[in-house]
Each structure stands twice: as structure tokens, then as C-alpha cells.
Amino acid sequence: MVLIVSSQQMFFTSEITTNSALDDKQPMAQSVASQWQINDAPPIQSGWSANTWQPDPKGPLWDLDFSPDATKIAGVEISDNRLFVWNISDGRVLLWIHHSAAIVDVVWLSDEWVLVADSGTNWYSYHVVDNGSSTPHTSTEMRSGQWSDGLTGTYSGYLWGLDASLNHSKVAFCGNINQM
């Protein structure tokens, strides 16, 4: 389950009541009462409201990432090995791709290209197109490669994650070195 909230703050307050004079005859449970209250709503602000949206994949989402232009969100479902891409404004599924291995991470390379890493040594980059259709794409232009010692500064092993630089010109992969 994923819940996206525009702003969230938690406030804890404690009310402790004590008697000013100790009374030997008073039971311990009545001498100090502690009551905690939690308020998980943000303080009321003029012109502010939380926008929430909850997608409905078959299983738990392992990772999420907003597109650089904040119009799409990509998520990887670990139980069914799928990449989902949603349109944020209306919740439509734009892309729905199945993989043979578990997908462990997702990151955007641009407003239209998303990169995922599987739990082996493979990475895949998909072109995301929003043509207004209510039916998600199940295929698209794709590029792929393997994380190996042939890449600058990397070693072979299982992929655990990846990230892109702020300008999306560089990608860093991480994993378990030489444990194939």
C-alpha cells in the first residue's frame, strides 16, 4: 500500500497529573497518571489541503520515484516483478511491464525515461509515453545492459540499488560484489 501525502507532521503531547502531596494510603496507579495523545494531522493553514492518492498493484511496492517534472510516479512491485508508471494528475497507469526477476530499484533519467534494476545483474531503461489512453502500455522502447566490471568503477555481483545524479547525467549502481 502506498499513500502519498503532500505534507505530514506528527505532534505528541503529554499530560501528566501528579498530586502535590504524597499520600501513603493512595494506590500507586492513582498517584501518577500519564496520558499520551497523538495528533497526526498538520496544523490548519489557510489555503492548504493534503492531496492523497493510493494505487492498486497486486503486491507491495518496493521502491517509488517521482519524475523530474513531477507529472508521473514510477514504482516497482517486488512480488510480481512489475514496473508501474502512473500519471499523478488522474492516477492512470501509463506503463505496466513484467520482468523475469525481482525489480529492486527505480529512478528517472529524464521526464520520459525511467531506469530499473533487477535483483541479478541487469538494468532496463523504458520510454514512458502518456498518450491519454485509459489502457496502460505493456510494451515500449527499451534499452538494457548488465552491471559488470566492464563499466567504470563497478564490479560484477547482484544489484541492490541505483540512483541518478541531480541532472540525470550519471547513474550509480550498488550491490553485492563477486557473490554470483
Image: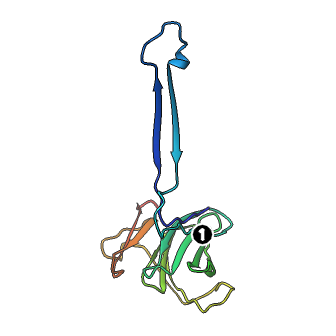
State whether residue 119 appears in this view: no
Q: Residue at x 58, y 78 (%)?
A: 86
Q: Secondary structure at mark 1?
A: loop
Instruction: Pick the residue in front: 165 or 142.
Output: 165
All told, the count of numbered labels is: 1
Label 1: few (<14), some or many (≥20) within 10 Å? few
Q: Position of residue 105 (x, y in %)?
A: 49, 68
The answer to whether 5 appears left or right of 136 in the picture is left
According to the image, what is the colour scheme of the structure? rainbow
Mark 1 — residue?
A: 53
User: Taking 24 as reference, is 3 above or below it?
Assistant: below
Q: Residue at x 34, y 70 (%)?
A: 154
User: Taking 2 as reference, is 68 above or below it?
Assistant: below
Instruction: Pick the residue in front: 41 or 157.
Output: 41
What amino acid is labelled 1 in the image?
Trp
Which quarter shows the N terminus?
A: bottom right
Q: Position of residue 69 (x, y in %)?
A: 44, 82
Q: Residue at x 49, y 67 (%)?
A: 6
Instruction: Pick the residue in front: 98 or 100.
Output: 98
State whether residue 76 appears in this view: yes
Instruction: Pick the residue in front: 32 or 170.
Output: 32
Q: Position of residue 27 (x, y in %)?
A: 55, 13
